[in-house]
Each structure stands twice: as C-alpha cells, then as structure tokens.
Image (cartoon, helix red, strand yellow):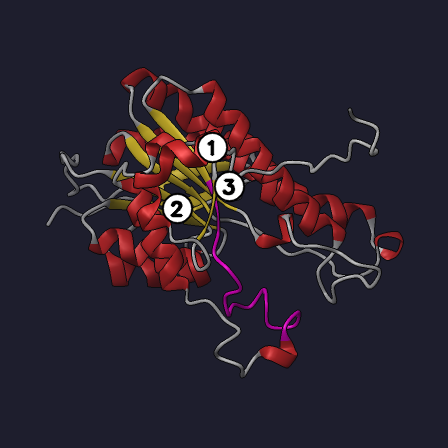
C-alpha cells in the first residue's frame, strides 16, 4: 500500500511532510476532504467515506486526534485552522497534488461558541463563531472551486444545523447563543449562493443538518436530555447522507437544505420537480400581505 503524506501547521502555514520512500499516489478513486474530521460527526464521516472507497484527507486542529483517525482509517491527516486563508489554500493545493483532485468537500468544522445572552458575550468570542462556521467554509469552498469548475465535477456539503431555522419564542434557547444560530443560517444561504454561481458547471453544493448528535459540543447544552436515547440522532445518519450526496443522486437539488434524520432524502431524486416547483428545502421568509391584497 502506498503511504500517504501528512500535514502539520507551522505558524500561519500548513506544511507537508512525506517520507523519502513515499511514491506519488496515482489513483482513480474519488478524493474527499473533510474538515473537523478528528472527532464527533466529522470522524464518523471520514470513516464512512474511507470505507466507501474514497481517498480521504481529514482536516482539523488537533494533531493527536487526527493521528488516531488516520491510523484507523488510512486517511491523510491535515492539521489545519480553517480560518487561516493561506493555510487553507496551501492544504488544498497539496492534497490535490498528492492525492488527486478533490471530488467531495465536507465543511464540517464548527464551534458552538458562548451560550450567554448577546449583550453579555465578548465580541471577539461572538465573532469567532462566524470565523469558524462561515469564514472557514467560505475559504475551503474558495480553494476547491476553481479546480472543480474547471474539471466540471465536484460536490460540496456544508454542515449546518436546525438552529438556523427553529422557532425562537420569548424564552431564549438554553445554551445556544445568537452567534451559533446566525452563523448556521448564514451557512445555509451561503450554500445556496454558491450553488447558483456554479449552476451548469457540473458542481453541486448542499447544506445539511445532522440533527442533534451526542458530541462534546452538545454535552452542556442538552445535559438534561443526555440519557434520553430517543432525543439523539446517530452521526451515522449524517455519514449516510454525505455518502449519498457524493453519488450525485441529488445533484438536481443543488443549493437545498437536507436534514439527515427528519427528511426522507433517499426519495428526493424522484421528487425533484415538485421540490423545485414548490421551492422546498430552502431558507425563506414567510411574508404577510397585511390583509389588504385584493
């Protein structure tokens, strides 16, 4: 088996280290880059794609956790801060040089941020949520899209959340801050914008929600529900959806939002015309005509 290279960060750069005995990889297998791939949902997606025959690059900030995932899956470990534009560009360039063109990008890296009231949150902490959840996805898309559009093939999956949509009443949702909700809504709209820009090029983009998954990020927010297994969505459902999107079965729904647990997305290929005609699976404002329309 050909050894795969690994990455580590050095300052604001991302450096590639390859043993002298490693030969350049030549493979017709599809290549996937998964950010936030060292634990939680991202790790499950990495394992699934590797098992499905992808050559996978798993990116995250933790070198130690990435090393464990790489050892278990054969994925290439990419130590990366997705908010660093130069590092993202370098990482994507080197992944493509060593593994091949990226066919599937999964923007899974994300943070919940502070759950305090908006006026009690440090501005830098609030904005950091946008930097990871939105800017990170933008930078990764920006890095892969020139090659994807030039080749006429590629798929992007941006991991959003139902926090982009759920109703907020007078009582604020416990532990879920305004930065997280706003950033996940922005990611949905960003995905739709990208999909419109690449329409007709052979590239597709989707936003998805994993549902509520047991992770370190959700432990404090949903402490009371921690032992209620019916409350939680399995991360395997997200891996199922990502793998399915990678087949191209739903390319006609590029730009739409899919829920891994709640949607019957395996049937959507047969319902494409209706979904598009009714403008479903999208972030829209329900307007009120004021009762004066004749």
- In percent of width and height, residue 7 lies at 37, 44
Q: Residue 281 carries which label?
A: 3
Depth check: give the residue in front, 92 or 224.
224
Residue that appears at 32% across and 22% down: 202
Residue 213 among those drawn in magenta: yes
- Nearest to N terminus: mark 1 or mark 2: 2
Residue named by callout 2: 34
Chain part drawn in magenta:
207-222
- Seen in the picture, residue 13 relative to 36 is either above or below; the reply is above
Depth check: give the residue in front, 168 or 24.
168
Q: How many labels does the image show?
A: 3
Residue that appears at 21% across and 56% down: 51
Q: Is mark 3 on a helix, strand or loop?
A: loop
- Seen in the picture, residue 79 relative to 197 is either above or below; the reply is below
Residue named by callout 1: 255
Q: Are marks 3 and 1 in contact (CB under 8 Å)?
A: no
| Left or right of 151 in this view: 176 | right
| Left or right of 284 in this view: 19 | left
Q: Are marks 2 and 3 in contact (CB under 8 Å)?
A: no
Q: Is mark 2 on a helix, strand or loop?
A: strand
Depth check: give the residue in front, 244 or 147.
244
Task: Assign the C terminus to one quadrant of the image.
Answer: top right
Q: Can residue 18 be seen in this view?
A: yes
Q: Which residue lies furthest to the front in this view?
A: 294
In three-dimensional space, the C-alpha distance between marks 2 and 3, rounded to whole angstroms, equals 24 Å
């Amino acid at each position: 088996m050909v050894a795969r290279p690994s990455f580590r960060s050095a300052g604001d750069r991302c450096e590639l280290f390859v043993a002298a005995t490693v030969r350049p990889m030549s493979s017709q297998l599809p290549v996937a880059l998964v950010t936030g791939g060292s634990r939680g949902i991202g790790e499950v997606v990495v394992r699934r794609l590797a098992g499905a025959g992808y050559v996978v690059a798993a990116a995250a900030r933790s070198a130690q956790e990435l090393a464990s995932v790489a050892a278990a899956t054969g994925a290439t470990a990419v130590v990366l801060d997705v908010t660093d534009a130069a590092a993202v560009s370098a990482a994507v360039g080197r992944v493509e040089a060593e593994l091949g063109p990226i066919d599937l990008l999964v923007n899974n890296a994300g943070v919940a941020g502070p759950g305090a009231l908006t006026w009690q949150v440090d501005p830098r902490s609030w904005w950091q949520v946008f930097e990871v959840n939105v800017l990170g996805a933008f930078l990764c898309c920006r890095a892969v899209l020139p090659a994807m559009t030039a080749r006429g093939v590629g798929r992007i999956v941006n991991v959003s959340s139902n926090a982009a949509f759920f109703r907020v009443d007078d009582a604020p949702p416990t532990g879920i801050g305004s930065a997280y909700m706003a950033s996940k809504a922005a990611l949905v709209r960003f995905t739709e914008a990208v999909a419109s820009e690449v329409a007709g090029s052979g590239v597709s983009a989707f936003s998805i929600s994993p549902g509520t998954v047991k992770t370190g990020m959700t432990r404090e927010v949903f402490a009371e529900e921690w032992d209620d297994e019916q409350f939680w969505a399995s991360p395997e459902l997200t891996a199922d959806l990502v793998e399915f999107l990678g087949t191209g079965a739903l390319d006609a729904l590029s730009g739409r939002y899919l829920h891994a647990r709640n949607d019957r997305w395996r049937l959507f290929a047969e319902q494409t015309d209706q979904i598009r005609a009714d403008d479903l699976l999208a972030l829209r404002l329900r307007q009120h005509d004021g009762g004066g329309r004749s």
